[in-house]
Image (tube, helix red, strand yellow):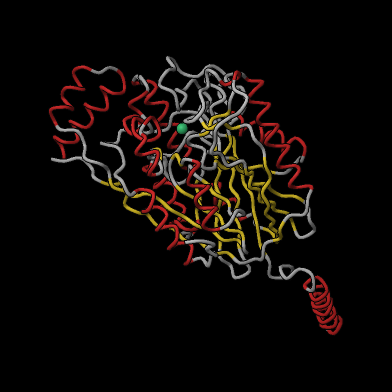
């Protein structure tokens, strides 16, 4: 007993001194630090399934180029506050699925919406999910059945994996830093067809490669979470893959056996990987992204204090005036394909509800790990938001688009006025009644400012 007590005292002293000496150059080390846990599962569909993202595909998938994954990083700060980052090789979760998943996570593990980031890489070589962009795919009964079954299994798997990640948490250190790479091209301001003849490219772009590094207390790498703002649209073939983000994860996991590499999409809605359309190009961009992450890992990264703040809200974004019943009837008679389906769906909604929806609850989220701010916004976020938010909150913040709900493109005020796919016509693809109303940018940024002040983020300009 006596021996045990003196051992405890000795250990305490040792911890105190170690702590003290480390704390002199780094305040974040100590016994009550971060905890982190990882879980992962392959989610590659096992039978032919319609692939998501393009209206041009004419039949279900044929074979597998690379497996798809869901990966979960659970973290806990020194006061026991938890959060989970869920990444997935998928095009996007519609609200219904995301709500099911996040509600279940709340019920089973007590995490609120602010503590869950449900991210999707936006690969266009992954399966169609239940209720997602159904108007643009010619799905028969058999495919609808396959998609429904896959989606239900997926929801369950993600919820179970979240529990496993929380269960597996061990004492950890977390670091952050941004790298850089430049293979995305602003697709609104450059023509893909004449790209090879261009000697200069027009922006804007965000070349940052945000990286979170998670190690155990001894510094052994456990997980790497990294992002990039660029559509995952190198490939439009019938083989399943995670596109360039999938290849980047594979490459990093090859050079760090046993480590989990997780990709989150940035504000890449108006950014394409160009040139594109070949498997070697998808691998090349994956390798370029992985190389930029490796460089960051090799350098001194910022060690984050074990203090976690999270905030989440849904801001009501309004739609412009929808087309009249007469013009919907005209479109339904004259148009083909998804435009026809869209008009018929709007007419059905008018009949069932007497009116069309006039606004949408848009998810806005902030995490702060130590002094690393992470902003996560729903839908297909154009790069101008990232640039705007970095002006407001500093260049080191991480900006994620494509989280929690894939409801639409999210244009800035300028892009909304200009129109085009990201400003207007994509609303039809998403089955929404009209384009967004003016004021969308201010509404999102104002809400962001509120969440930022809640989490103690520093604002650099008004
Ligand atoms: Zn997209």
96 displayed left or right of 50: left
113 displayed left or right of 23: left
Q: Up-down: is 320 above or below 183?
A: below
Percent of width and height locating residue 41:
59, 39
Percent of width and height locating residue 344:
21, 26
Give the residue at the far top of this rendering. Answer: 58
Q: How many marks?
A: 0
Give the residue at the far bottom of this rendering. Answer: 2
Q: Nearer the viewer, residue 307 or 202?
A: 202
Q: Up-down: is 113 above or below 348?
A: below
Residue at 61% over, 34% down: 245
Q: Up-down: is 91 above or below 107?
A: above
Percent of width and height locating residue 193:
52, 18
425 displayed left or right of 300: left
Residue 284 figure quarter: top right
Residue 139 figure quarter: top left
Q: Up-down: is 229 above or below 388?
A: above
Q: Nearer the viewer, residue 98 or 9?
A: 98
Percent of width and height locating residue 444:
40, 52
Residue at 37% over, 35% down: 418
Give the residue at the far front of this rendering. Answer: 199
Q: What is the quadrant of the N terminus in the image? A: bottom right
């Amino acid at each position: 007993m006596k021996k045990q007590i003196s051992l405890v005292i000795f250990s305490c002293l040792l911890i105190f001194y170690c702590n003290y000496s480390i704390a002199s150059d780094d305040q974040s080390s100590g016994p009550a630090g971060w905890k982190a846990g990882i879980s992962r599962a392959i989610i590659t569909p096992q039978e032919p399934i319609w692939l998501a993202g393009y209206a041009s595909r004419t039949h279900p998938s044929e074979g597998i180029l690379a497996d798809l994954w869901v990966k979960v990083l659970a973290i806990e700060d020194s006061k026991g506050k938890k959060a989970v980052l869920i990444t997935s090789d998928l095009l996007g979760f519609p609200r219904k699925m995301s709500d099911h998943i996040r509600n279940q996570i709340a019920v089973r593990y007590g995490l609120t919406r602010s503590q869950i980031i449900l991210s999707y890489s936006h690969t266009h070589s992954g399966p169609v999910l239940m209720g997602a962009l159904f108007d643009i795919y010619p799905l028969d009964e058999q495919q609808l059945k396959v998609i429904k079954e896959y989606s239900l299994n997926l929801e369950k798997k993600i919820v179970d994996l979240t529990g496993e990640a929380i269960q597996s948490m061990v004492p950890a250190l977390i670091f952050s830093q941004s790298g850089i790479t430049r293979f995305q091209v602003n697709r609104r301001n450059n023509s893909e067809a004449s790209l090879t003849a261009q000697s200069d490219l027009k922006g804007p772009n965000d070349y940052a490669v945000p990286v979170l590094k998670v190690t155990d207390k001894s510094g052994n790498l456990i997980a790497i979470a990294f992002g990039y703002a660029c559509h995952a649209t190198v490939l439009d073939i019938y083989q399943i893959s995670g596109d360039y983000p999938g290849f980047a994860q594979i490459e990093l996991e090859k050079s760090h056996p046993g480590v989990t590499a997780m990709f989150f999409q940035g504000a890449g809605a108006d950014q394409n990987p160009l040139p594109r359309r070949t498997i070697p190009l998808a691998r090349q961009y994956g390798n370029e992204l992985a190389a930029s992450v490796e460089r960051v890992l090799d350098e001194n990264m910022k060690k984050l204090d074990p203090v976690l703040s999270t905030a989440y809200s849904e801001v009501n974004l309004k739609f412009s005036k929808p087309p009249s019943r007469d013009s919907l009837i005209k479109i339904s008679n004259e148009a083909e394909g998804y435009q026809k389906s869209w008009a018929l769906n709007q007419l059905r909604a008018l009949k069932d509800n007497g009116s069309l929806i006039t606004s949408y609850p848009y998810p806005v989220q902030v995490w702060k790990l130590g002094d690393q701010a992470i902003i996560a916004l729903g839908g297909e976020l154009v790069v101008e938001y990232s640039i705007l938010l970095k002006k407001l909150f500093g260049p080191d913040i991480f900006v994620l688009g494509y989280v929690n709900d894939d409801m639409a493109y999210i244009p800035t005020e300028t892009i909304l006025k200009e129109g085009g796919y990201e400003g207007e016509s994509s609303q039809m693809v998403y089955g929404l009644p009209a384009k967004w109303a003016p004021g969308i940018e201010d509404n999102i940024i104002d809400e962001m400012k509120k969440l930022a002040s809640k989490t103690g983020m520093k604002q650099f300009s008004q």
